[in-house]
Each structure stands twice: as structure tokens, then as C-alpha cells.
Image (spheres, rainbow, N blue to C red):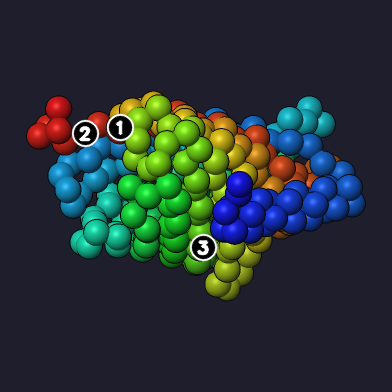
Amino acid sequence: MLSALNKKFILCLLILICFSYHRLKAQDIAPQIWNNFNVGWSINEHFSWRNNASYNVLISKEYPWYEITLTSTGVYKFQRFYEVSLGFYFARTKQTLSLSSIELRPFVGFRITTNPKKRWLVTNLGKIEMRNLIYSDNDNSLSWRFRNRTHLALALTNESMNDNNNLFVFAYFEVFYNFGQEVRERFFNQFKYKLGLGYRLSSRWNFDLGVIYQDSKITVIEPVNPTTNLITNYVIEWGINYIIPPRWQD
């Protein structure tokens, strides 16, 4: 029998699916595909270094959009369930038919998590970002943004999220708040959430696949061709994650 907590989780998922379906019916849509590879290094019990490379693309020949991103983050865990992070994000993006951009984005973050040895894992990550965008038309934008992501995961085949050979489901909800002017983007995010399935093979390897619903708007005007009403509200995202353990764990 399903526990009361599991029933509430399933009910929330059904509500999110119905909401997404209603929003998708009301707009012209095309999917994005996000491809991620993550490498992390646990230096010791307090310090870790995480790196991400991704290639993201809109499946549309008429209105091409793609981006290549690199992210590097240093993390310090100062309590069992608390950590702070400092990182840098780089992106090269094809915004429209005639406009491209480079983004340089330093950020700081604070994360709270529950015990990963339990079947349920809940984390919350808040970040403050300084967004510097350099455009191909010689324009520049500088903006500050706060974003907050709440992530939930549930182990399906084991009693702990830390167990090996563990299949798990997960979901997250993320909101964005921009300070000052809006930067020019093909997809200017307001909020998004993700539903997915993951597999932890070992302490080093895990894999995930999911679908993201994102609410975004167009803040860039195509100078050559009229801008499209095409809004991407769903993203197919998959990732490969590898963790290098501390030497004392080898």
C-alpha cells in the first residue's frame, strides 16, 4: 500500500502534468534537447569541485537556437546538511537567425539538504548570479538574478538514495527573479520544473533522464525577420554524472 506521503507526491505530479498539458495546448511549441556531462571531484569531506558541459538545441529548422555551456563550481560543506558554493558559467548561444551572444556569469549559492541515507531526499539551492551578455551586434547587457530550486528524489529499488544499483524518481521546481533590466534572450526564464528518472550505478556513476516544463518569454527582437511566437515549454534533458572520490576512499 502507498503511504500518505507517497500519495501526496503522486497527486502533485498529476497536478503538474495537467497544468503542463493545459499550457502546451495554448501555444505553438517545439522541444529543446539538453545534453549534459558532469564531472565532480570530492577533494575531502568538506571540499568538492563540480564541472558541467552541455549542448542544448531547439528542434526547429525555421528558428534555429542552440547553446554550448561550461560551468565550474567550488563547494564547501560546513555542516552535515549545509553547503556554500562559488562558481562561474560560460555560454555561447545562437539566440536568433542573426543574433548570437556570449554570457559570462559568476555566482554564489547556498544549499540545504536532508539526509541522503534516507529513501527520500529533499534539497533547496538558492543562487545569486551576475549575468554579463556580449552580443554579436556589439551591444552588452548586465543584470543580476536570484534563482531558487527545490529538488525532491525518491529511491525506488533500495532503502537509501546512497545505495548502489538504485533506481529513483525525482522532481524539482525552480523560480527566477531578475533585478533591473531584462537581458535580451530567446528564452528568458520565469520558472520551470522537471520530472525524471535516475539510476545510481555506484558512488562514481549515475545517469538521469527527464522532461522539463519551462515558462519563458522572448526578450530579443529579430532585426532581420519578424520574431516568432514559438515558445518552448518542454525540454528533454539527459545527463551522465561521474564523481572522482577522495583518495582515502579508493
Gap in angstroms between the C-alphas marked 3 and 1: 29 Å
Q: From the viewer's perspective, is the residue at label 3 or at label 1 nearer?
A: 1
Mark 3 neighbour density, 10 Å: few (under 14) some (14–19) many (20 or more): some
Residue lying at 50% horizontally and 46% vertically, measured from the top left: 154
Depth order, front residue of 61/196: 196
Mark 1 neighbour density, 10 Å: few (under 14) some (14–19) many (20 or more): some
Residue where numbered disc 2 is placed: 245
Task: Look at label 1 and name its amino acid.
Answer: Ser
Q: From the viewer's perspective, is the residue at label 2 or at label 1 nearer?
A: 1
Residue 90: image tag: none
212 vs 205, left or right, is right
168 vs 164, left or right, is right
Q: From the viewer's perspective, is the residue at label 3 or at label 2 nearer?
A: 2
The image shows residue 193 at horizontal and vertical percentages of 63, 52
In this rendering, does residue 132 appear at all?
Answer: no
Gap in angstroms between the C-alphas marked 3 and 2: 29 Å
Residue lying at 21% horizontally and 61% vertically, measured from the top left: 78
Residue where numbered disc 3 is placed: 147
Residue lying at 37% horizontally and 58% vertically, measured from the top left: 114
Residue where numbered disc 1 is placed: 203
Residue lying at 25% horizontally and 37% vertically, measured from the top left: 41
Specify the farthest residue to the left: 248
For the residues bearing labels 2 and 1, Cβ distance under 8 angstroms? yes
Specify the farthest residue to the right: 26
Task: Look at label 3 and name its amino acid.
Answer: Arg
Task: Look at label 2 and name its amino acid.
Answer: Pro
Q: Secondary structure at mark 1?
A: loop
